[in-house]
Amino acid sequence: MGNPKAFLSVPRKEAGYRPIHDRIHDYGEVEQTLNSNDRRTQASRCMDCGVPFCHWACPLGNKPPEWNDALFKGDWQLAYELLTTDNDFPEFTGRICPALCEKACVLNLMDHNPTTNREDECAIIEHAFSEDYVQPRIPSRNGKTVAVIGGGPAGLAASTRLNQLGYKVTVFEACESAGGLLRYGIPNFKLNKAIIDRRIALLEAEGIEFKYNQNIDSTKLPKGYDAYVVATGTPTARDLSIPGRELNGVYLALEMLSQQNRVLAGMQFKNNELVNAKGKDVLVIGGGDTGSDCIGTANRQGAKSVTQIEIMPKPPVGPEDPNSPWPNWPRTMKTTSSHEEGCTRRWNINSLEFLGKDGKLTGVKVQEITWEPNPEGGRPIMKPVGKPEIIKADMVLLAMGFLKPQHPQFQDNVFVVGDAANGASLVVRALASGRDIAEEIDRKLSH
């Protein structure tokens, strides 16, 4: 390491977010960037660990000590080459990854101020694009073909790896553009879609063929390919089947999020088709990242008020989680940029009934609950506390996760990857799954 003691004198410095009064009025990315000198200084904090747990924590096996050292020394091109050895799309993870590597950083154990790996990663890849380090790599072909069903993170990762190994890759995407959840689930204020377009253009220049608006039935895969990658994600959201679900004003989270992203891309919708929170009291049911994205989007659309409820207990306020100690991921209270922009948050709240008038939602009957240990083991028992109450709401957004898909018995040249195989998870895990499946396909087709 260039300066193995820098962590003793250099404090952690994050780029931070744009001011709330500024960012709340647009869909531009909320996160700011440090200048290159400050970024290199932050990279110097990566200490010469005996055991770098960041390697272990990252599903991709990312190696922050190596590329942070190159960044600190000003060798941006080497940093880029080291970074992309493991991570095919650092421009995505550098923006939206929860940075498991930082939670496993030895500095996080010492003083809860880990190296700024995620921001460093984003800076490296953006510098690489601006300096034209990123150029199309045209591989020699091996005469074999692979069909990838789904152009989300896992499908894209599998595609680029297979393409570089010499396979002719065709991506069949059900939507009008590639990206999957990156494009149609994650708001622009977290990931500008021009970042995705830039990468897709590069993949096309490298020889990957994209076919859009192709809703492929996994039981009727297109013929003529040597192998198939099923990367269809988790298309079915977890619904809430309680009385009043049919009322106008109750939506699945992605009905709002995907539509808003399409609107920003120039697509037009009729007024009666719009899922818009302007002037409404919005209730978000679900306390995860998707719920947070709904909050930020609702506020930007001009919601009158936003409330978020979660059926599970309030997580402990960090930075440490006794039940999941370092270097594991701490399940602590998370406050996102969207939460900072304004919402009421409540925990241990169970939804009982959607209430309405003349077919339109007016509120939700909820019940405060508590969780008690199950004497027989397994899931704790939910018990009501006090009396039910009504939360006023013109709009409800259901953000309770996604159902793990079920697949038929495939032939041995069909490989299920990412969320389609494992259920909804992190983008970085989908990328790792896509990369690993490409290696598995290559081993199979090479023999």
Image (cartoon, rainbow, N blue to C red):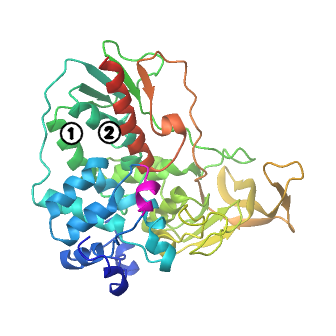
Residue drawn at 51 percent across, 34 percent down: 421
Whether 52 is among the magenta residues is: yes
Left or right: where 12 falls relative to 335? left
Residue at point 51%, 47% (across, down): 425
Question: Residue at horizontal 34%, vertical 47%?
Answer: 268
Residue 180, image x, y percentages: 39, 42
Q: Residue furthest top?
A: 224
Which quadrant is the N terminus positioned in? bottom left
SS of the residue under disc 1? helix
Q: Residues within 10 Å of mark 2 (few under 14, many from 20)?
A: many
Horizontal and vertical percent position of residue 262: 35, 49
Is residue 122 in sight in this rendering?
no
Q: Which is more toward the observer, 195 or 26?
A: 195
Amino acid under label 1? Answer: Leu
Q: Which residue is mark 2?
A: 156
291 sits to left or right of 128: right
Horizontally, residue 162 falls left or right of residue 97, namely: left
Between marks 2 and 1, how big is the CA–CA gap? 9 Å
Residue 69, image quadrant: bottom left
Is residue 194 found inside the magenta-colored segment of the image? Answer: no
Q: Dot 1, crowdedness within 10 Å: few (<14), some or many (≥20)?
A: many
Q: Position of residue 42 (x, y in %)?
A: 29, 76
- Report the amino acid beneath label 2: Leu
> Could you tell me residue 252's position as x and y percent?
56, 48
Name the element at disc 2. Answer: helix
Q: Which mark is residue 203?
A: 1
Above or below, comparing residue 234 to residue 315 in the picture: above
Mark 2 touches mark 1? (CB < 8 Å):
yes
- Nearer the N terminus, badge 2 or badge 1? 2
| Residue range corresponding to the magenta coloring | 51-59
Residue lying furthest left in this view?
132
